[in-house]
């Protein structure tokens, strides 16, 4: 193992909707992406069910505790931790962090953690990683379908729920891990659009659907509509280092199938400006 779980050392520095594109996968629950808006058009958001239910809250907390224990004792989790601490990924994380000691985590499109197990597994992994690694900072979460009860449980787990639907348009003003397994292509494209510059992209870590698989899928089916919704995914591929995760067993296939770590490394602004959309 290249470094301890708490402190990662590299070189001489230490680290303390409308259109959706969905690749086939088993056990998929639907995630909804509203019509894309610009940052100026984003609207404040509150759950439709304003009242929380103490009984539902208690049951959901128990479900999350069971799910987190399941992941924490799994070979899937041990394999993922080992992968994060390989020299290749340590180097990428070090580059993103720069002089900062922490990177925040933003979770988009988590889905209903009350209704489905895959979102519970995904959230469990995110929370466990924060507890394991001191370089992961605060966790912010958003999905327009979250209920008041789910929001309360997220807060109990140490997360904060965004009060605005950013539609993925979060600029990485500081090092940020975007945790987005099984989101629609449009949401990834929005994220890239908001960060389409060398300095911003260099501050982004993305855990989500494999961009390589998107490229292969689009090449195979040659669907112009799919290309339109994933144009920045395709354009950033030459500047992307991607590390596919291993789901290890079918227990985690539905939640993490085809997921990868993505790091972006364009060197010159002209490399990005030359790409026409």
Image (tube, rainbow, N blue to C red):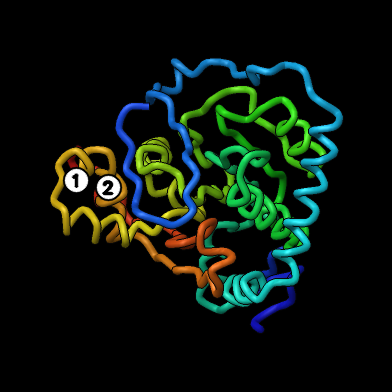
Q: CA distance from mark 1 to mark 2?
A: 5 Å
Closer-to-camera residue (275/188): 188
Closer-to-camera residue (117/206): 117
Q: Which mark is residue 87?
A: none
Q: Which mark is residue 272?
A: 2
Q: What residue is rendered at 27% in x and 61% in y? A: 238
| Percent position of residue 121, x then y | 64, 54
At label 1, counting other C-alpha atoms closer than 10 Å, the crowd grade (few under 14, some 14-19, many 20 or more) is few
Q: What residue is rendered at 25% in x and 48% in y? A: 270
Image vertical order of residue 149 relative to residue 254, above or below: above
Q: Is residue 62 visible?
A: yes
Res. 195 image quadrant: top left
Image vertical order of residue 106 relative to residue 264, above or below: above
Q: Residue furthest bottom?
A: 1
Closer-to-camera residue (139/193): 139
- Contact, mark 1 vs mark 2 (Cβ under 8 Å): yes
Image vertical order of residue 181 relative to residue 4, above or below: above
Q: Which mark is residue 274?
A: 1
- Location of the N terminus (image quadrant): bottom right
Image vertical order of residue 208 relative to residue 89, above or below: above
Q: What residue is rendered at 36% in x and 43% in y? A: 185
Closer-to-camera residue (137/199): 137
Q: Secondary structure at mark 1?
A: loop
- Location of the C terminus (image quadrant): top left
| Side of 21 relative to 54 (left or right) | left
Q: Secondary structure at mark 2?
A: helix
| Percent position of residue 11, x then y | 60, 77
At label 2, counting other C-alpha atoms closer than 10 Å, the crowd grade (few under 14, some 14-19, many 20 or more) is some
| Side of 37 relative to 272 (left or right) | right
Res. 86 image quadrant: bottom right
């Amino acid at each position: 193992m290249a470094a301890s779980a708490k402190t990662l050392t590299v070189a001489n520095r230490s680290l303390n909707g409308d259109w959706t594109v969905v690749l086939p996968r088993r056990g998929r629950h639907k995630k909804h992406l509203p019509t894309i808006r610009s940052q100026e058009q984003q609207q404040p958001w509150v759950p439709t069910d304003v009242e929380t239910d103490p009984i539902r809250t208690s049951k959901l907390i128990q479900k999350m505790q069971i799910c987190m224990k399941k992941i924490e004792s799994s070979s899937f989790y041990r394999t993922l931790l080992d992968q994060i601490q390989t020299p290749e990924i340590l180097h990428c994380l070090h580059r993103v962090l720069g002089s900062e000691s922490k990177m925040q985590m933003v979770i988009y499109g988590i889905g209903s953690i009350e209704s489905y197990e895959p979102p519970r597994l995904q959230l469990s992994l995110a929370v466990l990683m924060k507890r394991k690694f001191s370089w992961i900072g605060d966790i912010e979460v958003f999905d327009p379908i979250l209920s008041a009860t789910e929001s309360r449980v997220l807060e109990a787990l140490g997360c904060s729920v965004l009060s605005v639907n950013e539609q993925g348009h979060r600029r990485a003003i500081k090092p940020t891990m975007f945790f987005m397994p099984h989101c629609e292509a449009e949401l990834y494209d929005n994220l890239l659009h908001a960060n389409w510059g060398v300095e911003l992209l260099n501050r982004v870590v993305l855990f989500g659907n494999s961009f390589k698989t998107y490229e292969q899928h689009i090449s195979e089916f040659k669907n112009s509509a799919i290309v339109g919704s994933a144009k920045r995914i395709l354009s950033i591929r030459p500047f992307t280092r991607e590390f596919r995760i291993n789901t290890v067993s079918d227990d985690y296939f539905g939640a993490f199938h085809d997921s990868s770590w993505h790091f972006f490394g364009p060197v010159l602004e002209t490399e990005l400006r030359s790409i026409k959309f």
